[in-house]
Image (cartoon, grey):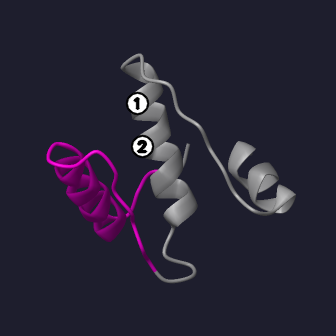
Amino acid sequence: MVELWGKQAEQLGEVRAAFRQHQSVLLQSPTGSGKTQMGAAAAKTATERGHTVTWLCHRRELLEQTSK
């Protein structure tokens, strides 16, 4: 897995903090900001902790990119 950049790690930390207070959280970030990498890092952490993760996207290409 790719190591997160500083801003990505910061945003992911904010998302994790938001999950402590809310049941659902939305991360909105511009194109090219590494949303897939942040999502993959979050999913990896969640599965390592025994949680189930469902990954949804609207294009097969995005699934293929993420799985790589």
Q: Give 43 or 5, whichever is nearer the viewer.
A: 43
Q: Give 62 or 37, whichever is nearer the viewer.
A: 62
Provide residue 43's location: percent of width, then percent of height: 48, 38
Query: What amino acid does circle 2 point to?
Result: Ala
Left or right: where 62 falls relative to 25 = right
Asked if residue 19 lies in the magenta stretch, the reply is yes
Asked if residue 5 lies in the magenta stretch, the reply is yes
Query: What amino acid does circle 1 point to?
Result: Ala
Is 25 situated above or below 7? above
> In which quadrant of the rendered view does residue 18 lie?
bottom left
At numbered mark 1, what does the secondary structure look like: helix, strand or loop? helix
Numbered-mark total? 2
Provide residue 53's location: percent of width, then percent of height: 53, 33
Residue sitting at 37 percent across and 64 percent down? 5
Is 11 situated above or below 29? above
Residue sitting at 75 percent across and 62 percent down? 58
Residue sitting at 57 percent across and 59 percent down? 36
Quadrant in which the C terminus appears: top right
Q: Which residues are magenta?
A: 3-29
Q: Which residue lies most toward the bottom here? A: 30
Provide residue 54's location: percent of width, then percent of height: 59, 37
Quadrant in which the N terminus appears: top right
Q: Which residue is mark 1?
A: 46
Label 2 to label 1, Cα distance in Å?
Answer: 6 Å
Left or right: where 10 falls relative to 43 = left
